[in-house]
Image (cartoon, coloured by chain):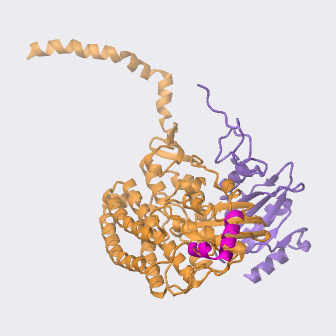
Amino acid sequence: MQEIINKIKERFSGANGFDGVKYAEILNYPGFEIPKEKLLEAALILRDEFGFDQLRDVVGVDRFVKQNRFESIYNVYSSENLNRIFLRSRLDSKKPEVESMCSVWPSANWYEREAYDMVGIIFLNHPDLRRIYMMQEYEYYPLRKDYPLMGLPGAVQLPKK
Amino acid sequence: MSEHITPVEPEIHQGLDKYAGILKALESDDVKAYFEDALENQLVLNMGPQHPATHGVLRLLVSLDGETAVNCVPEVGYLHRGYEKLAENMTFHEFIPHTDRLDYLSPLANNVAYVMAVEKLLKLDVPIRTKYIRTICCELARITSHLVFLGCMAMDVGALTVFLWTFRDREKILDILDILTGVRFTTSYTRIGGVALDISDEVIARIKTFLDDFEVNLKESQDLIERNRIFINRCEGIGHISKEQALAIGLTGPNLRASGVRSDLRRDDPYLIYNDLDFEVPVLTEGDVLARYYIRVFELYQSAKILRQCLDKLPAGPFNSPDAKQVLPGKEQVYTKMEELIHDFMIVNFGNAPEAGAEAYQAIESAKGELGFYIISDGKGYPFRLKIRSPSFSNLQSLPIMMKGCMISDIVAIIGSLDPVMGETDK
C-alpha cells in the first residue's frame, strides 16, 4: 500500500505538472487534495496507470466558509490491488463548478447527480445533470448549511385544485 | 339447407359493410407507412412507483420496441427522508435508530457500520467480545436479507412456495433478535463503544439450533427451484453484465461477485474479526440473474459457517469499551454513582465530541454490497457532514445496462436479482 502511495505522490509532484497537489492525512485512508483544474487528468492517471477501476462514491460538502466554500470528495477503489484512496478538491463559493468524472468512471453519473441535488455542485459535461431525489422544479439545495432543518415554507409548489 | 343459408348471407355482408371503412383506411398510404415501420415504433412504459414487483417505490421508464426493452431510465427519490440532513442536527447516539430505516431488511448490519464509523472518528477501541457479537450480528443480518432475496426473487419469476419457506426461516432469526436486542425488527442494538445488551447463553443456544435446521431447510428450498425448468429458463442468460461494465458502473457486493470480480471487504479490507475466521468468497463469472441467485445461496452457507466459528470462539469479557467519557454507562450505575451520572448527562445532552476537523470513512460488506459512512466532524457533539454510501443506490444504476434487449417479463426478474431496498437507495 505504502509503495503505491509513494509512487502516486511522485507522479503527482510539481515536476510532472501537478502543482498544488497535497497529500491529505486527515482521513483514515490516504487522500490527495488536487486543484479542480487538474482533477480529471489525475483521475485518468489513477485509472490507467495505477489500476483504480472503480469510483465508489462522490461526497459533496458545504464547508460554510467564505473562500472555497464547497468541496467534492471522490472515493476511489482498486479491485486489483484492493486499495482505496480519496481525492478531494475545493470549489468556488459563488460558482461551485467542477469537471464531471463520468468520462473516466461511468458510475459517477448518479453520485454526481446526488451531489448536485443536495449541495448544488455543478458538474460540467455531465451527460444527464438532473436532480435525483428532489423534484425537478425545486430551487434550493437541502444539504447546504444555510438551508434550515425544517425546510422553507412555500418552497414546494403544491398542485392547484 | 339452402333455406338456412340465405338469411345468413346478408348478415355477413352487413358485417363487411360495417368494417368497410376500416378496410379502406388500411389501404391508405398513412396506414401502410405505419405498418411498414411497425418495428421502429417505441412505446414508453411507466412502471411504478406503486408496483408490487419493483420492491418498494422504484419507478422505471422503459422504452419498448414490441415486447423488448430498448432503454430504461430509473427514477428514485420517492422515499427520500433526508437522513443526511437529519444527522447533522442530532448527536451521534441519536442517529443510531435512523440507521435501522436505511436497509430495513438488515438493520443490524447498518447499526454496526455506523457505530464503527463513529468509533473510528473518536479513535475508540472496542473489546474483543464486542467484535465477536457484532460479527454475529452482521452475519445474522446477511442471512435475513438473503432469505428475503431468495423468496422474493423466486416469487418474481413465478415460484411462490420458496417465499413461504424462506420467510419461515427468517421468522426464527427475528425471534432470536427479539431475545438478543429486545425487538424483532428495528433493532438499534449497537452503542458507541459497544452494544446495548450482552449476548446471553439462550441466544447462543438458539442460534446453534437454528443453524442446524437452516442448512437442511435451505437445501429443500434450493431443490424446489434449482431443477425447475421454468425457473432456469427465466433466469439463465437474462440481465447479463460483463466484468468491465460491472466495475465501471459501480456494482458492489454479490452483484459484482456474480460478474467474476473477487471483491469482498471482509477479505480485502478486514474489519471486526473477519481476519481470524475461515470462510470462502464465492465468485461466479456468468453475470446473469441465475449467477446472482447462486452467489447468494453460496453466501448463506458461508454465513452459517462464520456464525458457527464465532459462537465456538466467543470470548468472555466486557461488552462495552471502558472509556467512560465516550460510552454510555449502565442504568444501575447511573442511578447509584455520581461520576456515571455526570458522564451520562454529558453524553446524552452534548454528545460525543471528536477532534475538530477529523474525518473518517468506514465501510462494511453488507448483504447488498459496500455500506459506508463518511463522517466529517467540526469538534461538536454532532456530525458536520454525514454521507451514507448505500449499495442499493449504486447497484440500481446498472439497471439500464442489464435491461438492454430483455423482455418485459425479464425486467421483474432483473430487479429482483439486484435486490434493491428503496429505504437505502433514497436515504
Q: Report the side of B114 relative to A49 (left or right).
A: left
**Residue B94 percent coordinates (x, y):** 63, 61
Q: Front-most of B261 and B112?
A: B112
Q: Which residues are magenta?
A: B329-349
Quarter of the image for the N terminus of chain B: give it. top left
Q: Front-most of B1 and B308?
A: B308
Dominant SS type (magenta): helix
**Residue B346 percent coordinates (x, y):** 71, 68
Quarter of the image for the C terminus of chain B: give it. bottom right
Give the image quarter of residue B130. bottom right
Mark yes or no: residue A53 visible.
no
Residue at 43 percent of width and 64 percent of height? B290
Q: Is residue B348 magenta?
A: yes
* Chain depicted in purple: A
Residue at 61 percent of width and 73 percent of height? B334
Q: Report the side of B163 relative to B54 (left or right).
A: left
**Residue B239 percent coordinates (x, y):** 48, 57
Q: Front-most of B21 and B93?
A: B93
**Residue B268 percent coordinates (x, y):** 61, 78
Mark yes or no: residue B29 visible.
yes
Chain B painted colour: orange
Residue at 11 percent of width and 15 percent of height? B4
Q: Is residue B300 magenta?
A: no
Q: Front-most of B104 and B128?
A: B128
Residue at 50 percent of width and 70 percent of height? B285
Total marks drawn? 0
Give the image quarter of residue A21. bottom right
